[in-house]
Image (cartoon, helix red, strand yellow):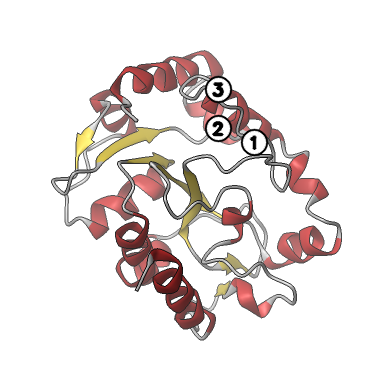
Amino acid sequence: MDKKEKYSLLVKDFKKYTFKDQSLINPFSVHGAPNELNPWAVWHGNLDAKILFIGQDFSNEFYLNELINNNWEKEKNSITNKHLNELFKLILVDDIGMPTEVEKALPLYFTNAVLGIKKGTMQEPIKPSQYKETAKEYLGKLINIVEPKYIIAMSEVAYKAICFIYNKTPLKTMKEAIEKNGIDLLDGKTLFVVAHCSANGRRNRDEKQQELDWKAIKPKLIF
């Protein structure tokens, strides 16, 4: 099977998945959800991606429903997404655009560590069990299908999900992981860890420092 066929089977299998954690629901339970493993792949979902970008989680049931009913306009205006757009400019020649406005297929695939979406508010904290539940069965299989050269994990949740998949012990702090700047995953892939670029993430690691973190990645990328 080629990548598209393998991915199609993975998505088909995930559609039937029911989360053990009852605070999460399958995004496919929302009418009109995109036919992707995670809604974020609407932005960039290239199965031949050189960079697999993993965020924390994709919001909640109400937000996804609102996006679907309003042609994703709110996602295009997201401050976090605009911050991310600016950060990617520090490592890529091409502009990554905004969701659903991408004019060309860039070598990127966007997904999240937590594949379920929240029933409650977006601010509810993520528990380790929420990313571990689907990490190896779905996110790990996605990595094997895409076979990216680089993985960028944005947030502690995304970093720890990758460590869980690869049976690695996480470093004690996010600061250590970020400053490690290129972690060998021993299967030909390199992991980069960055802080979340939301307003909350910038309280822990400010805008200037995040820019420096991303600039430090660029010399390590070889396409």
Q: Circle 3 is placed at which residue position?
A: 89
Q: Circle 1 is placed at which residue position?
A: 80
Q: Nearer the viewer, mark 3 or mark 2?
A: 3
Residue at image coords 71%, 34%: 79
**Disc on the earlier residue, 3 or 2:** 3
* CA distance for labels 3 and 2: 14 Å
Give the percent coordinates (x, y) of residue 205. 47, 24
Crowdedness near tag 1: few (<14), some (14–19) or many (≥20) residues, C-alpha within 10 Å: some
Question: Left or right: 57 with respect to 83?
Answer: left
Q: Circle 2 is placed at which residue position?
A: 197
Tell me which corner region of the image, top left, top right, bottom left or bottom right, holds residue 172: top left
* CA distance for labels 3 and 1: 14 Å
The amino acid type of the residue labelled 1 equals Thr
The amino acid type of the residue labelled 3 equals Lys
Question: Left or right: 211 with respect to 66?
Answer: left
Crowdedness near tag 2: few (<14), some (14–19) or many (≥20) residues, C-alpha within 10 Å: many
Q: Is residue 160 above or below residue 34?
A: above
* CA distance for labels 2 and 1: 6 Å
Give the percent coordinates (x, y) of residue 137. 33, 72
Residue at image coords 69%, 45%: 99
Crowdedness near tag 3: few (<14), some (14–19) or many (≥20) residues, C-alpha within 10 Å: some
Q: Is residue 222 above or below residue 5?
A: above
